[in-house]
Amino acid sequence: MTTITKEEDGRHGRYVARIEGIDAEGEITFTHRGERVISADHTGVPDNMSGKGVAKALLDFMLDDARQSGFRIVPVCPFVRAQYARHPEWSDLFTTAPGEDPQA
């Protein structure tokens, strides 16, 4: 069973995934960039959690949080940016166009 939580400490935070019986954590880290805007900075999933859908579950949790809380996402992380490029229907949750490099 995968459990996902949100942790925040001032300007920075992360979505954390834990799987019962595995001593590791997957995460998407983020930074508050302004009022109602965060950047998804990094997605990390350790090898012993690989192949279990953890990164996708983290992304889904972040997207649901954005919908419920009313913020938008700058997709800095390559994984988040690539998933967004495959799902242009998420455009209401992001601050860039699909496939656009926010660091360019």
Image (spheres, rainbow, N blue to C red):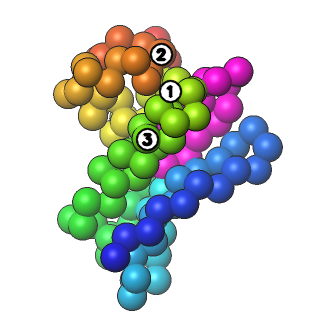
Return the mark for residue 64.
3
* Vertical placement of residue 98 versus 62, above or below: above
Q: Is mark 3 on a helix, strand or loop?
A: helix
- The reply to whether callout 2 and callout 1 are in contact (CB within 8 Å) is yes
Q: Residue 73 carries which label?
A: 1
Instruction: Report which residue position mark 2 lands on.
Output: 95
In terms of image quadrants, where is residue 17? bottom left
The percent position of residue 104, horizontal first and vertical second, equals 46, 12
Residue 42 appearing in the image: no
Residue at left offset 50%, top offset 27%: 73
Residue extending farthest bottom: 21
* Residue 43 x, y percent position in the rendering: 43, 48
The stretch in magenta equals: 28-43
Residue at image x 26%, y 21%? 89
Image side of residue 20 versus residue 10, left or right = left
Task: Choose between 69 and 87: the one closer to the eye.
Answer: 69
Q: Give the mark, 2 or 1, whose residue is nearer the N terminus.
A: 1
Q: Which residue is rendered at x = 43% and y = 24% of the image? A: 93
Q: Is residue 74 above or below residue 6?
A: above
